[in-house]
Amino acid sequence: MASKKLVNSVTGCADEALAGLVACNPDLQMLQGHRVALRSDLESLRGRVALLSGGGSGHEPAHAGFIGKGMLTGVIAGAVFTSPAVGSILAAIRAVAQAGTAGTLLIVKNYTGDRLNFGLAREQARAEGIPVEMVVVGDDSAFTSLKKAGRRGLCGTVLIHKVAGALAEAGVGLEEIVRRVSAAAAAMGTLGASLSSCSVPGSKPTFQLPDDEMELGLGIHGEAGVRRMKMATADELVKAMIDHMTDPSNESHVPVRAGSAVVLVVNNLGGLSFLELGIVADAAVRCLEARGVKIARALVGTFMSALEMAGVSLTLLLAEDALLQLIDAETTASAWPRVARVPVTGRPRSRAAPAEEPEGPEPAAAEGAASRRAALVLQRVCATLLGLEEHLNALDRAAGDGDCGTTHSRAAKAIQQWLEERPPPSRPDHLLSALARLLLEKMGGSSGALYGLFLTAAAQPLKTTAGLPAWTAAMDAGLEAMQRYGKAAPGDRTMLDSLWAAGQELRALQSPGANLLQVLSRAVQSAEAAAEATKTMEAGAGRASYISSARLEQPDPGAVAAAAVLRAILEALQSQAA
């Protein structure tokens, strides 16, 4: 079965993709009758070298995303993973020549079809008297022994676009540009790794990859790599990639060693999430710097993809000052990122956090009875939440991402670690404030923010009021803060439903002679009943409000968790009173 693709037709997808880029970029124009995009200001290039590149579609944003002042003059696109037609390449060469350019350089990735078709177009143009040169880029570092076909052209080709574009913009002649970019291409290597294959529109995936394996050293056309390896962490994969790329016994290695300065490109092969890409980038920087390699510039993003392939490639280009000036030169190409013109290595990457305001004095003997009681209560709460992790996650899947249990478990583990490091404050306001800070920092998600709000607000009345009535005021303050910022109300099918029900019962603490355990027991029963009642409520706030009420057949996980916390507090206090 063919994979799903959001296209109008298989046959027209390459044309329409290029047309879409041109339609949204006034600086580009299509060449009539051809799948060719050109700068719309060709006449401004009179007397300067034109740069043409291209290849099969499916590698977006390469190559058309790199058309612009300071980069490519134009691009000739083939069908998906198919070399462009000779006639279209020749038409593009003629178009830039007619604009009065001082020769044309063809920048071609090292694939047989591209070499043949661009080479044939070059010969025909030269026969017409048009000065044309061709540079074939082969930056693949996968193969330890080189075959006759040579190294494949991969993402490093984009860096050659940039170097050549800066030289052409500066008015450098054709022969000198060829010399300079050939030298740069020889000092560069790229290696790819993937968690999946890809599929050409209308076709099945190009190869199958088991769930527990990844492919190392693959190309950009869905072809398999040089070897498969078991799934590994990002750090392990990046180390394996850089080891392979820089191994002197590898005939296609990049001669990077301690003291070298490099341009690093972390390239998304199409289907990797931005989260994963950032993790890989961090791993690459740490791995290189640990080896004494200076990262002069770093580019992270999608530059040359392989359709939806969930993978990444790393490119290393040996850099010296003259080359960095070309990398840093201005360009209007839409896909070229804004790169800081300073080295990555050697820059401070963190700033000291402001010191927190010290709280009021803690009564002597913080490890006294009140502190020990608080620790026992918190330990009971943590054990309860850890035991509910899978149940809460299951409830949460009906409304979204299924992580409510994980979020509460993360909070419980953070509290447990906190208790191991220090006794909890014995003053109630200090205790709630400390828990608020901890949950805001460690719990995450909207639950962390809501609990943090609740506890921060609840701590305020406890600073000035003592006794059981103060806890009523604390509960009211916490609930008011949750409603003000969370925008939920009782009956909206959220954690507030449980807490609100408990809060109404806790008002009895204001009565003289109120019994804490009896009042808290009624509050817990009300909270549990309210949590159960949420299964018949229509969600009015939170992520569940975007889901049809017919699909919400389970109680709200946040309400269940809040009721469970209250139950754990009650049971801990009861055991202490026994």
Image (spheres, grey):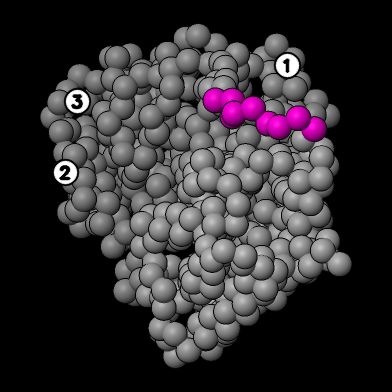
Q: Is residue 371 visible?
A: yes
What range is drawn magenta here?
Answer: 357-365
Closer to the camera in the image, 255 or 410: 410
Closer to the camera in the image, 392 or 291: 392
Choose mark 1 or mark 2, whichever is in front. 1
Mark 1 residue element: loop
In this view, 562 is above or below 550:
above
Left of 144 or right of it: where is 7? left
User: Residue 541: where, in percent of width, then height?
Assistant: 39, 70
Label 1 – label 2 distance at C-alpha: 44 Å
**Pointer 1: what residue?**
292
Precedes in sequence: disc 3 or disc 1: 3
The residue depicted at 45 percent of the width and 69 percent of the height is: 543
Label 3 – label 2 distance at C-alpha: 17 Å
**Quadrant for the N terminus in the image:** bottom right
The residue depicted at 54 percent of the width and 66 percent of the height is: 511
